[in-house]
Image (cartoon, rainbow, N blue to C red):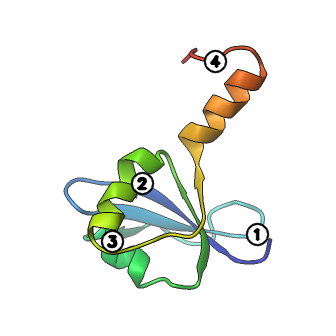
Amino acid sequence: MGGQRWVVAVGEGRGADLVPLGSDALPAGPAVREPDLAEAVRSRPDVDRWVWRSTAEIYPRLLAAGVRVPRCYDIEAAELLLLGHEGRLGEP
């Protein structure tokens, strides 16, 4: 995995905080406050994978702006899979 990855934390309104990740999955730079998430994603076509808490929360906003993301890490979905594997599906 050698591509760019960015973490997204949704902010108020249409904005978000974005943080680039290094190959070690640690922050590779400071958080960047973007006033428009869709434009921020659109302006970073070289990002191979986006990391966010919930695709259900973020992706409709991107689609409404005509932005598609080919790959992402959905933390909420990963948590559900791991809890299910442990027989703990539905636990917080």
Q: Can you tell which mark lies on residue 9?
A: 2
The residue that appears at 57% across and 72% down in the rendered structure is 29
Instruction: For marks 2 and 4, give the CA distance.
Output: 25 Å
* Residue 3 position in % (x across, y down): 71, 77
Viewer-side label of 1, 3:
3
Q: Amino acid at mark 4?
A: Leu
**Camera-side residue: 3 or 55?**
55
Number of residues whose C-alpha sits closer than 10 Å to that of mark 2, classed few (under 14), some (14–19) or many (20 or more) = some
Mark 3 and mark 2 residues within 8 Å of each other at the beta carbon? no
Q: Nearer the viewer, mark 3 or mark 2?
A: 3
> Could you tell me how far apart the alpha carbons at marks 3 and 4 are, in whole angstroms?
32 Å
Quadrant of the image containing the N terminus: bottom right
| First in sequence: mark 3 vs mark 2 | 2
Judge whether residue 55 can be spotted in this image: yes
Above/below status of 60 relative to 21? above
Q: Residue at x 37, y 76 (%)?
A: 40
Q: Count neighbours of disc 3 (C-alpha within 10 A) and say few if under 14, some if 14 to 19, many if 20 or more.
A: many
> Label for residue 38?
3
Q: Which mark is residue 23?
A: 1
Q: Which secondary structure, mark 1? A: loop
The residues tagged by marks 1 and 4 sit, at their Cα atoms, a distance apart of 31 Å
Where disc 2 sits, the SS reads strand
Residue drawn 33% across the image and 71% down it: 38
> Residue 55: image x %, image y %?
46, 50
- State which tag comes first along the sequence, 2 or 1: 2
Disc 2 residue type? Ala
